Amino acid sequence: MSATVEHPVGQIALVDLLDRLLGAGVVLAGDVVISLSGVDLVQIRLHALITTIRADMVEPR
């Protein structure tokens, strides 16, 4: 038994958005640089791939 929820055009529930994003996969990338007088002191890089793993994606043992 499944229920279908209809949203007005232009609105989507957060859980539906997360389901769509994780189903297709999301790539996050970002850089943060802290500098003083033009000298870079700290540089942080973030690269992340977030996705779901379905049963048909897993190789049998």
Image (cartoon, rainbow, N blue to C red):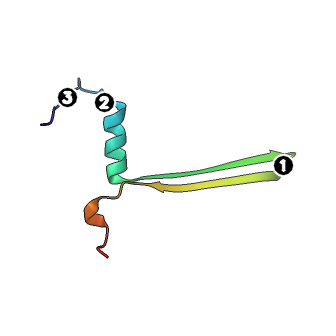
Q: Residue furthest front?
A: 61
Residue type at numbered disc 1: Gly
In the displayed structure, would residue 7 be above or below residue 55?
A: above
Pick the residue in front: 40 or 42: 42
Return the residue at label 2: 12
Residue drawn at x 32%, y 51% is 23
Residue type at numbered disc 2: Ile
Return the residue at label 3: 5
Classed neighbour count for the residue bearing mark 3: other residues with Cα under 10 Å, few (<14), some (14–19), many (≥20): few
Pick the residue in front: 37 or 41: 41
**Quarter the C terminus occupies:** bottom left
In the displayed structure, would residue 3 be above or below residue 26?
A: above
Position of 8 with respect to 28 (left or right) is left
- Residue 49 location, x and y as percent? 47, 56
- Residue 50 location, x and y as percent? 44, 53
Residue type at numbered disc 3: Val
Position of 14 with respect to 37 (left or right) is left
Q: Residue furthest bottom?
A: 61
- Marker count (numbered): 3
- Residue 18 location, x and y as percent? 37, 41
Residue drawn at x 78%, y 52% is 42
The label on residue 38 is 1
Q: Point out the frontmost of discs 1 and 2.
A: 2
Q: CA distance from mark 1 to mark 2?
A: 44 Å
**Quarter the N terminus occupies:** top left
